[in-house]
Amino acid sequence: MKIKDVKRSIAIGCVLLAMVGCGTKFIYSNLDWIVIEYVDDYVSLSRGQEEILSDRIELLSHWHKKEELPIYLRQLDTIREQDPSKVSTSFVAAQMTDVRAHGKRLVEQMTPDLYALTQQLSDEQVDELVANLAKKDKKLLEKYQGLDEQAIRSIYQERIESSFERWYGQLTDEHQNLAYRWSQEMTITVIDWQMHRENMQRYVDQLLRRRNDIAYYQPEFQRFMNDPDSYYTDALVEKIQKNRAVAARYIAQSLNTLSSKQQQHLAQEIDDWRDIATDLMATTALDYSPTALIVGSAYNRG
């Protein structure tokens, strides 16, 4: 399972999805095999590696419910209390920043276990992983290959409209117009991301093949996991910052122009996610034996 990227905050509702995108009882109850199935798309793990990964995911799930869901709930409450007609660009930008912080904490918590897992990979598994990562990047490249600027902007517009509709319900002409204007104002980053992925392919290949050189591998792996922005070019950073500012402005405008019916739709979506998070928090203590909880406490201190 992919831990939802915080960049999905294309609308205030998508901020909510990014915060609790893993927040269903089914996923939490089956997180170990879901993640293993996802990892298995990239590298075939041995039975022993799968068992270790399953144990660590179980503890990660407990940590996430106990430590992170209360934070998400507080943010959901903050968003729920806002009058949509008065939401400002600065408020939306602050929520987007908070969501990125949520994602960063999650990755930081996962890093030690992923580091340990990569240390256990054989050369054959590294070859498989690098090859599959390259295949995925090739598919992403092919998605936009041959498209002109307006075709790319049309894809942006479709995504924005889809997100608006998911969280606001039936769209008005005004929201469709906002989606169009937003897509036209965005800075296209397709080429920048393609170059970045090509650079990172080479970097990951080198990184994993030097995994036994602890003096090199440990700090580089930490940087790779916890400071991904440091690999961006100055040009890409500038474009990302601009697009975030544009997104915050248009999200605010979309909220300011919601009809009463759309406000009710959004409020219900937020309440549904709050109920899911609250329910998960209430079941945390029931999910583990006393022994597992003791191990989990040690894990959180580590």
Image: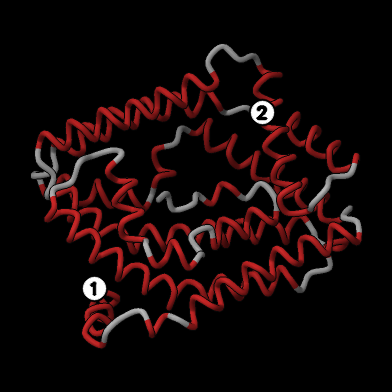
- Are the residues flagged by discs 1 and 2 in contact, CB closer than 8 Å? no
Q: Nearer the viewer, residue 197 or 31?
A: 31
Left or right of 99 on screen, residue 262: right
**Where 55 falls versus 130 (above or below)?**
below
**Where 213 falls versus 288 (above or below)?**
above
Q: Secondary structure at mark 1?
A: loop
> Which amino acid lies under the numbered mark 1 shown in the image of this protein?
Gly
Q: Residues within 10 Å of mark 1 (few under 14, many from 20)?
A: few
Quarter of the figure with residue 55 = bottom left
Quarter of the figure with residue 72 = bottom right
**Where 197 falls versus 58 (above or below)?**
above
Left or right of 39 on screen, residue 175: right
Q: In the rendering, at what x and y percent does residue 203 appear?
A: 27, 32
Q: Residues within 10 Å of mark 2 (few under 14, many from 20)?
A: few
Determine which of the numbered discs, if any, sits on residue 74 in the image: none
> Which amino acid lies under the numbered mark 2 shown in the image of this protein?
Ile
Determine which of the numbered discs, if any, sits on residue 302 in the image: 1
Q: Secondary structure at mark 2?
A: helix
Q: In the rendering, at what x and y percent does residue 210 appear?
A: 13, 38
For image coordinates 73% across by 70% down, the residue present is: 80
Determine which of the numbered discs, if any, sits on residue 155 in the image: 2
